[in-house]
Image: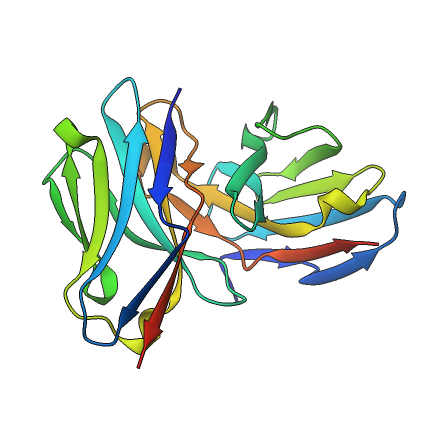
Amino acid sequence: DADVTQTPRNRITKTGKRIMLECSQTKGHDRMYWYRQDPGLGLRLIYYSFDVKDINKGEISDGYSVSRQAQAKFSLSLESAIPNQTALYFCATSDWNRVHGYTFGSGTRLTVV
Amino acid sequence: AQSVTQLGSHVSVSEGALVLLRCNYSSSVPPYLFWYVQYPNQGLQLLLKYTSAATLVKGINGFEAEFKKSETSFHLTKPSAHMSDAAEYFCAVSEEGAQKLVFGQGTRLTINP
């Protein structure tokens, strides 16, 4: 099994719908992150969490919310999806004390029509 | 604030030729620097990282990068390109204590036979 698992892998949804992307990890890392990837823009941070009781906004949090249900689970919600939220979404984890960088999931490709 | 600029959104080289992908960073304190690779339909995989030890860092698949403080650069090189190197490459920076990565825009590497 993958260390960081994202579900679903692909999703098409309609404008205005609420959608949740899920991330779970078996790394035992305390830090978890959600990024979105757009062509030519690289990866931009949406939200991050350093433990279950700690949630922080990233640079592009508008229109998104998150929930850290457990150390191993971090979900991203789009409250009312819009077409410009069409992107590739990545969850990542880190054990920062070891400066290992991140471990990434395989991504969720979301299309909002 | 920390930032990363990757020069060239697309780089094309012939098989067997030198690969050079450029990355410049901005950081107010000594940074941690990373290169990640993304193969089609996959997540990001760590190639190498600089964490204030040796300035020449060797990574996986024959890649290496040199940290040059005077030039605020962390360029990625490989002496001889292979077809399997075709992918998108991301440079990322983090300051000690910042605990989150800031990514560049990405460079798509194409290998010509």
Above or below, B83 relative to A77: below
Q: Which residue corresponds to the image point at 27% horizontal and 46% vertical from the top-left?
A: B22
Q: Is residue A16 left or right of residue A104?
A: right
Q: Is residue B29 left or right of residue A12?
A: left
Residue B17: image location, x then y, percent: 19, 70
Q: Which residue corresponds to the image point at 53% horizontal and 55% vertical from the top-left?
A: A105
Q: Residue furthest bottom?
A: B113
What is the tally of numbered marks visible in this picture? 0
Quadrant position of the C terminus of chain A in the picture: bottom right
Q: Nearer the viewer, residue B4 or A17?
A: B4
Q: Which residue corresponds to the image point at 30% horizontal and 32% vertical from the top-left?
A: B25
User: In the rendered view, how is the structure colored?
Assistant: rainbow
Q: Quadrant of residue A69?
A: top right
Residue A32: image location, x then y, percent: 53, 39
Residue A13: image location, x then y, percent: 84, 55
Q: Nearer the viewer, residue B17 or B77?
A: B17
Residue A64: image location, x then y, percent: 73, 34
Q: Quadrant of residue A7?
A: bottom right
Above or below, A3 relative to B99: below
